[in-house]
Each structure stands twice: as structure tokens, then as C-alpha cells.
Amino acid sequence: MFPFDTITLDDPIIQNECCKMAFIRGLFISKGSINDPRKSNYHLELVIKKPELAVIVQQMLLDYGIPMTLTTRRNQSMLYIKKSELISEFLAFLGANSGVLQFEDLRIMRDLQNSVNRVMNCDIANSQKSLQYCKEQMEAITF
């Protein structure tokens, strides 16, 4: 098992490009998680004990164009992403191509369902307004 919490900026493992990417992959496998996008909001996180390491990882990922937010939870540092596009980019960066395809498929389905629900809600609201207007007109005619 690799001691992730002992990494420093001078460590040779994060100096080489391919080793840096392998380090981030290993970090996600051991310390990361991603929620099921069908059940709740989009969320990917890396939980890291040492705040110094979290800052190093945050900077490494930012160098690759993947911004992660740093926060503290239960005395541990946590890097997280809430935007679905950035989660896809992160998974692609890790080389998890099938994971990207699955995530994007679920995201598209969810977005489509949300769009359909919005249109249906709008149609229902418009129908109710029309019905109310017609009812008021009928009452006015009867009067």
C-alpha cells in the first residue's frame, strides 16, 4: 500500500508526468468516490487526511484543467466537483472511458427527463390557467 499522506512537492513520484497521472488515478481509487447521478446531485470527491497533500493534488489537477473545490469535513480535507461536465473531464483524465460513457448516458437521460418534466409542468399550468379563464368567462356570460 502506498503511503499517500507522506507525499511532498519534492517527492520524485509527482515530478514525472506519467507518474503524476498514475498517482492521481491511485488516489481516486483509494480515497475517491462518485455518487449515482440517477439518485441525487452530481458529486465526485477525494477525501485526504493531510491538508498539505490536498493542496498539492488540487494544484496538480488544476494544471490539467480540472478545478476542484477544497473544503474540510470531519477533520479531513476534501476535494470535490459538483459540475457534471467537470466530473466527465476528470473521469476521462483518469482514463476511465467506459465510466465516462456510463456517466454521460445517465446524465443525458436525467437531463432529458428533467426537460420533459419541465415541459409537462408548463403545459399543466397553462391548461389550468386556461380552464380558470374559461370558467370566469362563463360566469361573466351567465351574469
Image: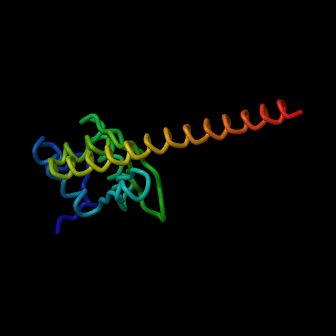
User: In the image, residue 121 lies at what x, y percent?
Assistant: 55, 43
For this orientation, the residue located farthest to the bottom is 1
Q: Residue at x 31, y 43 (%)?
A: 108
Q: How many marks?
A: 0
User: In the image, residue 29 lies at what x, y percent?
Assistant: 22, 61
Q: Residue at x 19, y 53 (%)?
A: 25
Q: Nearer the viewer, residue 103 or 5?
A: 103
Horizontal arrangement in the rendering, residue 80 relative to residue 120 (left or right): left
Horizontal arrangement in the rendering, residue 103 relative to residue 120 (left or right): left
Q: Nearer the viewer, residue 73 or 91?
A: 91
Q: Quadrant location of the C terminus?
A: top right
Q: Quadrant location of the N terminus?
A: bottom left
Q: Nearer the viewer, residue 93 or 83?
A: 83
Horizontal arrangement in the rendering, residue 141 relative to residue 94 (left or right): right
Q: Residue at x 38, y 51 (%)?
A: 79
User: In the image, residue 83 lies at what x, y percent?
Assistant: 39, 42
Judge whether 45 appears above or below 140 on screen.
below
Q: Residue at x 43, y 52 (%)?
A: 41
Q: How is the image coloured?
A: rainbow
For this orientation, the residue located farthest to the right is 143
User: In the image, residue 118 lies at what x, y percent?
Assistant: 50, 41
In the picture, residue 30 is in which quadrant?
A: bottom left
